[in-house]
Structures are given as structure tokens and as C-alpha cells.
Image (tube, grey):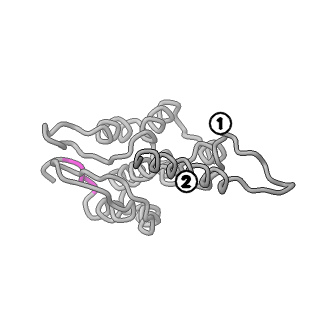
Amino acid sequence: MKEITYVTTALFFIFLFCSCSQSSGKNSKPLSVNKKPKSNVANEPDFQQKNKLVIVSSNMNNYILKLEKLNTVDGEAVYYAGEKGDFYKLYEVIIKEGTEKDFLLMLNNPKSTVRIMGALCLAQKNKEKYIKQIQSLYGDNTLVDFFPGGCCGGPEKVGDIAKQIMKNPKLLNSGL
């Protein structure tokens, strides 16, 4: 008997939820299961297409795409095995192949990992010249998983990471 009551109650709430989620009236549109709701979130694909950055070298575009897929900023010796993190592996290539212009453009990317990479590379190439550009990230409250070294880390604001980069541009290198 109790099972029937639970099922009936559950069906009632499902019906109530479905009927409340649709608006009624002449101007109402039926809900579509396949349509994605529009969003103003910066890392949505629509935003990225409208604000696509043009990077000088074609190889850099491939690295930027890989960076955009990452959600973690990790260093040279991280996690249990003390291996290079994915972010750090990309950093080793980007710092060699990228130009200062590439790094400046990266600061304006909607993805936090790309902005951090831009700041990190600029700080290592010529910190004094790009102080203001790197400091422009100080107010960025976007959270990103940050593992500079070892197996400890967690969410940290992009602005706080930028401040750490200004203090020590090699903070992702082990032992520094």
C-alpha cells in the first residue's frame, strides 16, 4: 500500500513540475528537448566563435585548442607520481614556439587556462615590460584547479594565480 502511495506522489510531483515549466498563453513556445538554452557564460561555444582570437602562428592555434580543453593548471612535478602535468607539458612547447604577441592575445581568451598560460609566458619572457597586462588579471575571480607542485592543490582564482606568477614566474617548476 505504501509503495502505491510513493509512486502516486512521485507521479504527481513529476506532473506538477512539467506543467509548471511550460508557460501558457498566445505567445508561449513549446519546450524543445533538443534545443540548448541560450547563455551568456563566457566559455560557451557561441561566445568563443564570436570572439575567436587570431593567433600569429598556426601551430599556436592547435595549442590554444588543447589548453581550452584543460580545467587544471598543473606544474612540472605533480600528483602521486611526480610527473609533468598536462598544462605544464603544453607550457614547455608554447613558451618556445609562441611570441609575445601570442601571449598578449591569450590574456583575453575566455578560457581561464589560456589566460593563465599567457600571463605565465609573458612573465618569463619580460615581466617588467608586461606588468600592467598581467596585473589586468588580478580582478579575475574565475576559479580553476591549481596544482603548482606535489599532490596538493585545489580551486584558486585566476587573479590570485596571476599575483603568484608576478612574484615567481617559475612557480610551476619543481623545486622553485
User: Which residue is most to the bottom?
Assistant: 139
- Tell me how far mark 1 sits from mark 2, CA to CA: 23 Å
Point out which mark residue 97 bears: none
Classify 10 Å Cα crowding around label 1: few (below 14), some (14-19), many (20 and above): few
Point out which mark residue 34 bears: 1
Q: In this picture, which residue range is highlighted in magenta?
A: 169-173
On screen, residue 29 above or below 62: below
| Quarter occupied by residue 162 | bottom left
Q: Is residue 53 left or right of residue 134?
A: right
Q: Percent x, y for residue 115?
A: 44, 52
Tell me which residue sits at (54%, 38%) in the image.
Answer: 56
Q: Percent x, y for residue 149?
A: 19, 49
Is residue 59 visible in the rendered image? The answer is yes
Mark 2 lies on residue: 13
For the residue pair 70 and 41, the one nearer the viewer reads as 41
Q: Amino acid at mark 2?
A: Phe
Q: Percent x, y for residue 151?
A: 16, 48
For the residue pair 79 and 90, the one nearer the viewer reads as 79
Q: Earlier in the sequence, mark 1 or mark 2?
A: 2
Tell me which residue sits at (38%, 45%) in the image.
Answer: 71
Q: Amino acid at mark 1?
A: Asn
Tell me if residue 144 is in the magenta stretch. no
Q: Secondary structure at mark 1?
A: loop
Q: Secondary structure at mark 2?
A: helix
Q: Percent x, y for residue 155?
A: 31, 57
Tell me which residue sits at (35%, 35%) in the image.
Answer: 93
For the residue pair 45 and 130, the one nearer the viewer reads as 45
